[in-house]
Amino acid sequence: DHIATVRQARGGRYPDPVQAAIEAEEAGADGITLHLREDRRHIQDHDVFRIRDVLQTRMNLEMAVTEEMLCTAEKVKPEHVCLVPEKREEVTTEGGLDVKGLFDSVASACHRLGKQGIEVSLFIDPDRDQVEAAARAGAPAIELHTGAYAEAKTAGAMQEELDRLRNAVVFGLEQGLIVNAGHGLNYQNVEPVAMIAGINELNIGHSIIARALFTGLKPAVREMKTLMLDAAGKAF
């Protein structure tokens, strides 16, 4: 997304998100996440199809719960779709999807995409009610929103949010869900989250691209993956 943001700033043809996806994979990325927003502010439709054609790992397509996006996912057939809330006025995704409040439409989307062989994940806050609603909606996976943890201003607040995440992971696993996490994670704060036992994967983008401005993309990916794997080895 952030590579596409730079490209769209001038409406040109570079930098190319497809090349970024290839280089990330070559550096050890386990998958590529991209968000096709309704306003097409960064990733464009042709990016999604081109990246799908070249990936050697797997695509995680983030999208809103709309008919247009569901139709796109049915055409692209990514390995994973992560359903997210979306507001045109937001700079980035703010908060998790209200699965409990939007239950019928979310459950319908999970069923529809599941019939296409797509693993559906719901991007939700680490809230017990939302985790329970995600399981009832038929989603095989959730992605816990780590934004509150990443934005915590004090050590105490950070620990409180980390505990919320850990409790949500435990409850999610009890519900039979695959538990992922992401949003706002960077090279300074990723390790405590990666140490939470039971987390399947972390989806990280902005901080890697920011680091890549100074180190190059491949070293930035390798450094993040090393931090994650080292921390995961100490999981509890």
Image (cartoon, rainbow, N blue to C red):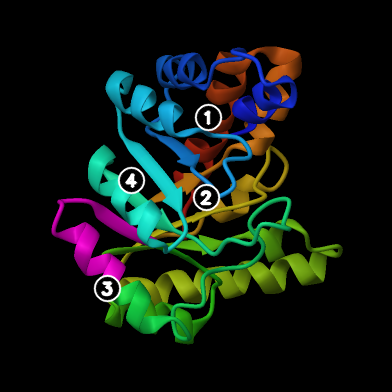
The residue labelled by disc 3 is 108
Q: CA distance from mark 3 to mark 1?
A: 38 Å
Q: Quadrant of residue 213?
A: top right
Q: CA distance from mark 2 to mark 3?
A: 32 Å
Amino acid beneath label 4: Thr
Q: Which mark lies nearer to you, 3 or 1?
A: 3
Q: Residues within 10 Å of mark 2 (few under 14, many from 20)?
A: many
Question: Which of the marked residues, 2 or 3, is nearer the chain's N terminus?
Answer: 3
Amino acid beneath label 3: Ser
Is 185 drawn above or below residue 109 in the view shown?
A: above
Q: Which mark lies nearer to you, 1 or 4?
A: 4
The residue labelled by disc 1 is 226
Q: Mark 3 and mark 2 in contact (Cβ < 8 Å)?
A: no
Which part of the image, by quadrant, shows the N terminus? top right
The residue labelled by disc 2 is 194
Question: Which of the marked residues, 4 or 3, is nearer the chain's N terminus?
Answer: 4
Q: Which mark is residue 172?
A: none
The residue labelled by disc 4 is 72
**114 in magenta:** yes
Under tag 2, what secondary structure? helix
Under tag 4, what secondary structure? helix
Amino acid beneath label 1: Thr
Q: Magenta residues, as a range?
A: 108-121
